[in-house]
Image (spheres, rainbow, N blue to C red):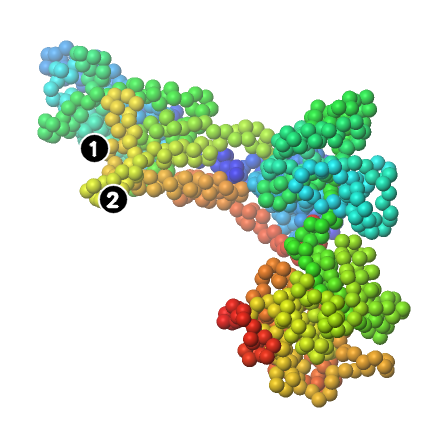
């Protein structure tokens, strides 16, 4: 596109004294809407308007203000978030640019707004180094370790076997003691109210020392001093309470460059040492006990979960929950991983060759992927496992049932109702017409048994009545299985996962049934009919359904707690 | 915080009574009148075969202390004190000399002069010219002290309504003029003018519902404090009129006390402010409880608006709160984002990138 930039700029009434410095590069005066006139330079990309121009405050004529999103060079970072589409008409693109630039120059966002995105801004720092941490921050200052390769920090940890093996698994290597250096963890006591470091504006030495000195006790100061004696490089991990009430975890790495400096000088505390040390901010990727959780989606308490059934739905469910930060699972399944249904199983075909027990393979896979995850396995049929006393249902916080066998599930439902542990049943229907998740034993009436009517049909069913079982042979193989695809099991696992999170958020009343429905095309083409329930709109099916509850259910109607029942 | 100092200053330029330019006419009128009074008094006293007293004139009012604003109705006024070198003890009728001045200026203008309680008013209405009026308070001295006494009363009022009232016009001028210096003084004047304009815009002009300007001015002398703020963009410390005005309004508000009115069986916010010079009377005394209460409520609204404006970072939004509702349409409103930047045609496109977070 051939754009006359000079003309484009001159036509804007808010721009004045447009002078071409060189092709694509102009200087001009920008009049803010409050009347303030500021000299800027603007550099267009040949790809304008697909690419936005670069705007600087012209430091020849104006000082570079110390305000957020303006870098020391005068660069105005007017577009910081991704996911924005702007007009492709040059005049409008320019309006968009100057609207944004003006916003940076006149906005006086309260400090808390920057604190809210502390991590984001800290991550924009130019000379930052990224490190892992498997150390779970505590409330007391303490000596920890840092894995350093060639003097460069790699990860914070505690120098014990557990921490080392966790990190070893994460990095897929053996952590040797000689690679560990000492670091100091400092939780600040008082809320930090100051500026959030960003782009090329890291804290000055004075700012760091005042950050430390003003936010810790005398006692902590002494501990830092003691720790910091006689070192040539220093690693600190700081926990900073922010205005939002959250806490930021960052690291600082000091490398001494003036080696004749007294060993008693401590960079974190003495502010007169600007040139004697190089300080590098450390952006910390936390892989400790608290963060997998916080970042994943909000699992707050350590939860002991029993997963019964490790087929397609069960394995996908395990994957979603583990990735979201749940860590303790007991898996029960007596099936082995076979090639014929491996295409929709989480583990995939290559794991099916040896025909190993699913529970064993899953443990291996997940503990490798997520070193924080702990999995116990029971390779047995569930009812037998319970009846022979191998497990006690009351020991679990949550039971997930993904067996897909109504007859076993009916019995399991009764056993669960005798315990005090809530459960979520989940299963998928044939040919992708839908899937379900049902909460059981979460106070009040409603259970798996309620779904079953006198004709032994399931209330939830999206498939209509059929004399023929919904089974189809695949490739003439001997193994029979309900035909549903990988996406359908995943969708069902997702439905159940969301229910698990609601359970954790204490956001489920009683024992709802939720369902999803897919296309009925293949199903109907195969000669089957859908049920009346299938005709309900998707959003209705997705909502909590309590209609299924049978007040005379022989499994749950004599339960005492009916607190939630009347509300629906 | 809204950065709208420039808008405040533009507003001030628009409402300020320009001393040299706009008031030049007034000054000429004043000089013609004072000359006429001097000559007239001479003639009258000579006619009576009395010693002709010497006369002194003193500029009074907002014009004298440079706190005037362009009047809404273009009725410019000028206050000029006439001080006779005579003793009040020789003049039992306080209106006698006012009548003399009225008579001297009888045919000076088309509209006959009028004797009001505190002064004689000369009204100018010349063709094609805005209307002016000149208020002439009349003062005498005393044999027993150095005070001045204002001739109070109307021509045919009964005896009780005609008296000599202690006054110190020069002291008042000095009190106001000498209260602040340099930048503080400039901001003080601006803040008083903003308040006067607000008064014109937000109060009914009839009766005493408008708080008197002298009240606002006296209060500002005591309560105003110079405010500056650091402008992060320019890196300079600059006057902060919004902050100073807000500060003054909230201090003035705090001077109100809740008072129970037994007759109306209701409580009112009332305010009292003593004149800092003779006769030390309450400058708000003419306002009724109801009027003072409404004054208070309006101050609260103004304070809220100033706080709200301060909270906006967009200058258009900030000024839009203040103008025209509180300060009239002379307060400039910068164009809105939408008006300037046509259509930015921006959408926020949800992408996996924007959901990744940290």
Residue A198 is situated, as x and y percent measured from the top left of the image, at 68, 39
Residue A37 is situated, as x and y percent measured from the top left of the image, at 58, 35
Instruction: Name the residue that disc number 2 marks.
Output: B266
Camera-nearest residue between A112 and B216: A112
- Give the secondary structure at mark 2: strand
The residue lying at 81 percent from left, 29 percent from top is: A232
Residue B344 is situated, as x and y percent measured from the top left of the image, at 61, 51
Asked where in the image residue A127 lies, by quadrant, the reply is top right
Q: Residue furthest top?
A: B51
Instruction: Name the residue that disc number 1 marks.
Output: B111
Camera-nearest residue between A193 and A547: A547
Disc 2 to disc 1, C-alpha distance: 44 Å
Left or right for B150, reference A366 = left
Asked where in the image residue A483 lies, by quadrant, the reply is bottom right
The residue lying at 71 percent from left, 43 percent from top is: A123
10 Å neighbourhood of mark 1: few (<14), some, or many (≥20)? few
């Amino acid at each position: 596109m051939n754009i006359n930039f000079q003309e484009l700029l001159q036509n804007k009434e808010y721009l004045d004294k447009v002078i071409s410095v060189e092709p694509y590069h102009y200087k001009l005066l920008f009049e803010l809407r409050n009347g303030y006139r500021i000299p800027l330079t603007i550099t267009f990309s040949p790809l304008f308007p697909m690419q936005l121009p670069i705007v600087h405050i012209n430091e020849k004529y104006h000082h570079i203000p110390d305000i957020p999103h303006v870098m020391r060079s005068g660069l105005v970072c007017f577009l910081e978030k991704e996911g924005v589409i702007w007009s492709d008409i040059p005049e409008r693109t320019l309006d968009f640019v100057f609207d944004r630039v003006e916003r940076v120059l006149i906005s006086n966002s309260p400090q808390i707004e920057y604190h809210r995105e502390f991590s984001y801004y800290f991550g924009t720092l130019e000379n930052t180094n990224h490190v892992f941490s498997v150390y779970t921050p505590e409330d007391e200052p303490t000596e920890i370790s840092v894995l350093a390769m060639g003097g460069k920090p790699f990860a914070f940890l505690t120098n014990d076997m557990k921490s080392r093996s966790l990190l070893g698994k994460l990095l897929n290597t053996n952590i040797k003691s000689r690679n560990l250096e000492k670091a100091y963890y400092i939780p600040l006591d008082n809320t930090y109210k100051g500026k959030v470091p960003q782009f090329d504006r890291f804290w000055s030495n004075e700012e760091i020392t005042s950050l430390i000195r003003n936010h810790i006790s005398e006692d902590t100061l002494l501990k830092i001093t003691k720790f910091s004696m006689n070192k040539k490089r220093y690693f600190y991990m700081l926990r900073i309470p922010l205005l939002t009430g959250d806490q930021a975890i960052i690291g600082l790495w000091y490398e001494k460059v003036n080696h004749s400096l007294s060993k008693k000088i401590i960079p974190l505390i003495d502010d007169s040492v600007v040139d004697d040390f190089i300080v590098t901010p450390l952006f910390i990727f936390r892989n400790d006990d608290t963060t997998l959780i916080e970042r994943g989606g909000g699992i707050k308490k350590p939860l002991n979960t029993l997963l019964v059934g490790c087929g397609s739905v069960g394995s996908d469910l395990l994957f979603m929950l583990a990735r979201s930060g749940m860590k303790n699972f007991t898996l029960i399944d007596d099936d082995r991983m076979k090639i014929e249904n491996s295409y929709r199983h989480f583990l995939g075909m290559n794991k099916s060759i040896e025909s190993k027990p699913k529970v064993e393979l899953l443990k291996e896979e997940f503990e490798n992927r997520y070193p924080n995850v702990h999995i116990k396995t029971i390779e047995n049929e569930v009812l037998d496992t319970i009846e022979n006393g191998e497990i006690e249902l009351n020991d679990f916080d949550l039971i997930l049932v993904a067996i897909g066998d109504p007859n076993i599930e009916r019995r399991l439902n009764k056993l669960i109702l005798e315990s005090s542990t809530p459960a979520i049943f989940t299963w998928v229907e044939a040919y992708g017409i839908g899937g379900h998740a049902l909460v059981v034993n979460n106070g009040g009436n409603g259970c798996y048994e309620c779904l079953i009517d006198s004709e032994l049909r399931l209330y939830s069913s999206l498939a209509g009545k059929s004399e023929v079982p919904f089974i189809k042979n695949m490739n003439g193989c001997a193994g029979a299985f309900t035909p549903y695809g990988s996406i359908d099991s995943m969708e069902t696992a997702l439905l159940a996962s969301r229910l698990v999170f609601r359970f954790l958020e204490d956001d489920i009343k009683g024992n709802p049934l939720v369902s999803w429905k897919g296309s009925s095309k293949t199903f109907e083409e195969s000669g089957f009919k859908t049920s009346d329930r299938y005709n309900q709109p998707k959003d209705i099916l997705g909502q909590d359904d309590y209609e299924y509850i049978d007040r005379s259910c022989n499994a749950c109607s004599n339960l005492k707690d009916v607190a939630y029942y009347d509300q629906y | 915080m809204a950065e709208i100092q420039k808008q405040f200053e533009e507003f001030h330029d628009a409402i300020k009574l320009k001393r040299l330019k706009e008031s030049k006419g007034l000054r000429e009128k004043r000089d013609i009148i004072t000359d006429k009074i001097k000559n007239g008094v001479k003639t009258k006293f000579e006619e009576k075969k009395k010693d002709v007293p010497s006369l002194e004139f003193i500029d009074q009012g907002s014009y004298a202390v440079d706190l005037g604003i362009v009047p809404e109705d273009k009725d410019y006024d000028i206050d000029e004190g006439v001080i006779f070198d005579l003793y009040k003890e020789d003049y039992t009728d306080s209106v006698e000399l006012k009548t003399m001045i009225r008579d001297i200026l009888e045919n000076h203008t088309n509209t006959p002069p009028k004797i009001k309680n505190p002064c004689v008013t000369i009204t100018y209405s010349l063709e094609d010219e805005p209307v002016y009026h000149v208020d002439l308070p009349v003062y005498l001295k005393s044999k027993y002290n150095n005070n001045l006494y204002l001739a109070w009363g109307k021509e045919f009022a009964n005896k009780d309504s005609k008296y000599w009232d202690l006054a110190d016009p020069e002291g008042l001028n000095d009190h106001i003029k000498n209260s602040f210096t340099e930048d503080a003084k400039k901001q003080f004047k601006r803040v008083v003018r903003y308040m006067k304009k607000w008064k014109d815009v937000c109060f009914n002009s009839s009766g005493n519902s408008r708080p008197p300007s002298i009240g606002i001015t006296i209060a500002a002398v005591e309560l105003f404090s110079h405010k500056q703020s650091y402008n992060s963009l320019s890196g300079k410390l600059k006057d902060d009129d919004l902050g100073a005005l807000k500060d003054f309004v909230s201090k003035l508000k705090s001077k109100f006390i809740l008072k129970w009115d037994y007759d109306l069986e209701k409580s009112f916010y009332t305010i009292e402010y003593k004149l800092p010079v003779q006769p030390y009377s309450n400058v708000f005394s003419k306002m009724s409880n109801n009027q003072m209460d409404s004054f208070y409520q309006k101050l609260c609204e103004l304070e809220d608006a100033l706080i709200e404006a301060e909270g906006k970072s967009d200058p258009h939004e900030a000024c839009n709160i203040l103008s025209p509702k509180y300060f009239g349409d002379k307060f400039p409103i910068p164009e809105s984002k939408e008006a300037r930047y046509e259509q930015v045609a921006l959408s926020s496109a949800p992408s996996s990138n924007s959901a990744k977070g940290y």
